[in-house]
């Protein structure tokens, strides 16, 4: 396959795992309020402009941002952000490349409407530093429709129970009568990109029920899924408020 000459724009969103050697310590590293755990979630965003001069040669420039966070599993957790600006020249030693793929739309179930249910669990620590860790759990449902190849759009509904919401309500003088009072319900728009057994799932939307108003009216979720079969998958996700980590979720789901 020969290169297409001219201008091209690329975007990359890549979740993964990051390791930090020097974390927060009350005595020896108390100024580091960014990270308090060695193992963290890592997210990389990249936007690139590339101009292809020939089948072999191209020039490129772009902006990238890498974010590290433990998802409030342990405080402090302001997060680490590493922006990058780059320019470069690319050279391909072969003028043409033959690509073989076994992926097709039918094998990925992307040619039809799909229903998905996910059960999630996790834990988070709230301020002040050193306070107890609260359990989080919930249930999510979504319905998605096919768009372009390997891409889907849809809507979702989330039921989220966060133990720290009870402490927030008590601190504000709001009485808590049952678990319903510390449960949040949210509706969202979903986007999913799936290749093979892995997919990236993004969601953003408003809370439609909540007594605890901390965090603002909107929430976001970035999830990485791995399909063990055509229907069963595992999930790790980061829930945020305006980009600030709320907690990390671990889940198991089924797609119908």
Image: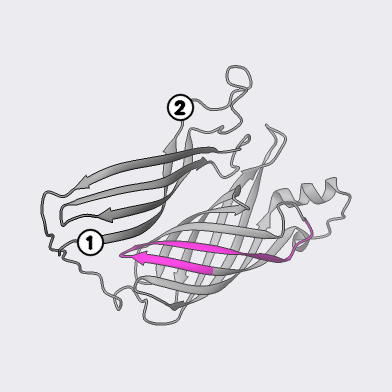
Instruction: Depth check: give the residue in front, 32 or 143.
Output: 32
**Is the N terminus in the top left, top right, bottom left or bottom right quadrant?**
bottom left
Q: Decide if residue 141 is on the left or right side of residue 87.
A: right
Q: Residue furthest bottom?
A: 112
Q: Which residue is the site of mark 2?
A: 21
Which span of residues is magenta-colored?
190-212
* In the rendered image, the vertical position of residue 53 relative to residue 64, given as above or below: below
Q: Nearer the viewer, residue 250 or 22?
A: 22
Q: Would you place residue 15 above or below residue 34 in this image?
A: below
Tally of numbered discs: 2
The nearer-to-camera label among 2 and 1 is 1
Question: Which corner quadrant of the image does residue 76 belong to?
Answer: top right
Left or right: 156 in relation to 182: left
Q: Residue under circle 1?
A: 5
Residue at 86 percent across and 48 percent down: it is 172
Disc 2 vs disc 1: Cβ atoms closer than 8 Å?
no
For residue 196: magenta?
yes
The disc placed on residue 167 is none
């Amino acid at each position: 396959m020969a290169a297409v000459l001219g201008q091209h724009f690329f975007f990359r969103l890549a979740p993964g795992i990051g390791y930090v050697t020097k974390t927060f310590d009350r005595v020896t590293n108390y100024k580091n309020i960014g990270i308090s755990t060695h193992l963290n979630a890592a997210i990389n965003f990249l936007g690139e402009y590339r101009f292809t001069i020939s089948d072999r040669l191209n020039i490129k420039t772009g902006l990238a941002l890498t974010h590290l966070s433990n998802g409030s599993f342990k405080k402090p957790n302001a997060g680490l952000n590493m922006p990058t600006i780059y320019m470069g020249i690319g050279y391909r030693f072969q003028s043409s490349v033959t690509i073989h793929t076994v992926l097709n739309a039918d094998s990925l179930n992307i040619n039809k409407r799909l229903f998905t249910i996910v059960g999630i669990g996790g834990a988070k620590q709230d301020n002040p530093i050193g306070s107890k860790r609260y359990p989080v759990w919930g249930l999510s449902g979504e319905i998605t429709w096919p768009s372009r190849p390997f891409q889907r759009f849809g809507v979702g509904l989330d039921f989220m129970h966060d133990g720290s919401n009870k402490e927030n309500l008590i601190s504000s003088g709001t009485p808590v009568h049952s678990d319903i009072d510390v449960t949040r319900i949210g509706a969202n728009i979903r986007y999913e990109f799936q290749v093979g057994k892995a997919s990236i799932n993004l969601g953003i939307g408003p809370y439609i029920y909540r007594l605890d108003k901390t965090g603002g009216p909107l929430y976001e979720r970035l999830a990485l899924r791995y399909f063990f079969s055509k229907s069963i998958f595992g999930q790790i996700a980061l829930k945020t408020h305006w980009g600030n980590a709320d907690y990390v979720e671990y889940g198991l789901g089924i797609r119908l």
